[in-house]
Amino acid sequence: MKRTTVLVIGGGVTGVGVARDLAVRGVDVTLIERGGLASGTSGRSHGLLHSGARYAEADRLGAEECIEENRVLRNVAGACVNDTGGFFVLLDGDDEEYYERKLAACRDVGIPADDVAVDAAHGVVPDLPADAVRVMRVPDAVVYPSRLVAATAESAREHGAEIHTHAPLVDLHVRDGGITSATVGGSVDDRIEADYVVNAAGAWAGQCAALAGVDVRMRPTKGVMVGVDYRGLGPVLNRCRRPDDGDIVVPHEDQVVLGTTSVEVEDPDEFDEEGWEIETTVEQCARLLPPVAEAEITRTWWGVRPLYAPDEESRADAGEDARGISRDFFLLDHADGGVDNFASIVGGKLTTYRLMAEATADLVCEKLGVEAACETMDERLPGADDPAKLDELVAKYDARSPSDEDVVAPSPSER
């Protein structure tokens, strides 16, 4: 039987972030992931590093968290991030008062936001539509999740963590109000004893928690991403309207990624990939960048958002537009439910993963009596300055994923 102080379940960006934060603080930590790293939600996003502008007028705290973590990641993650900047584009017929509220809210929150002359915006993006009437520049960026997850995992490993890919959780064993061990299959094929267990399984968090007799209600939603051939787009393009299907275009090197839809699903592993989602996304994104309407679709993929059901229900009860508000993250201490050494971290978004990991590590250290401060805000990730090294780490952790497969170099076995 293997032994660790903290077992982290889930090798997405939040899980590797937790493992890294704990390892940097000197805690013995082991992470398990059922597939390659980033094989769940993290590697199936559109790859936007939020500035917070999307949420500024509706959720000040969420916007503040985004801009702070945006700055941290641009500082520590190097070539995991492409600092493109972003435009929010108001089209003829859209609500100009909404544009003004967003612009004022960004400035109030501390998000650098400038009103750009439309002619100047056309100089940056010549294919902006002719009916663009207002353009706001914000510090959005593009993140390459495969690189970010792999580099974060490598940092955790360098600080002493064990990272196990293709190691699915089979069972959690509970006795006397605590988890004593986990049965892990695949590459581990053993039981792991742990003093504390962190559930960072994202959309699958409810399934993992159930193995310990704990109820964590998730409400996952699917969204499609569409990659099309288009070279040379500079900034991220956002439609300046209340968030809806097909309102973002994310630049890559020779492609752009169009997103996205939001449809509730029962099972994050089993859902229909529906043609109307692709058609709607392309049609609506073509309002922002008309040439994509006729561009060749090179790939499509769906991601599943790890939404926490009680939060979604409270938003609905309050009559809130859930897509227009930053999704909070929730750190659930299951001591309240009778399992003393178990916590789940759910919700949130990729942009704030480091903050989510810090909050989780704070809780775990408090439980374990570890007095060590978080240091991940300033420590640069391994390979951050070397894209080739980052891509080697992606191959090492089998972290290559749809979000950035057109950017990340294939491993030797894929060539």
Image: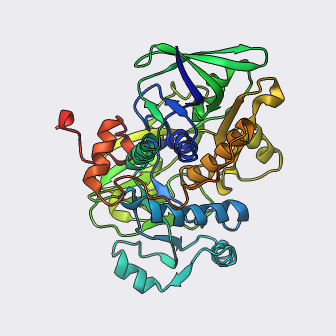
Which quadrant is the C terminus positioned in?
top left
Image coordinates of residue 39 in percent, x first then y, are: 43, 34
Asked whether, in this view, residue 301 is left or right of residue 409, the answer is right
Image coordinates of residue 402 in percent, x first then y, are: 37, 41
Residue sitting at x 64%, y 74%: 106
Confirm whether residue 251 shows in the render. yes
Residue sitting at x 65%, y 64%: 63
Confirm whether residue 52 shows in the render. no
Q: Nearer the viewer, residue 256 or 165?
A: 165
Q: Nearer the viewer, residue 33 or 256?
A: 33
Q: Nearer the viewer, residue 36 or 96?
A: 36
Residue sitting at x 40%, y 68%: 84
Residue sitting at x 36%, y 70%: 234
Asked whether, in this view, residue 117 is left or right of residue 4, the answer is left
Colour treatment of the image: rainbow
Q: How many marks?
A: 0
Image coordinates of residue 308 in percent, x first then y, are: 69, 38
Examine the image and state in which quarter residue 220 appears: top right
Q: Is residue 288 above or below residue 361?
A: below
Asked whether, in this view, residue 206 is left or right of residue 13, the answer is right
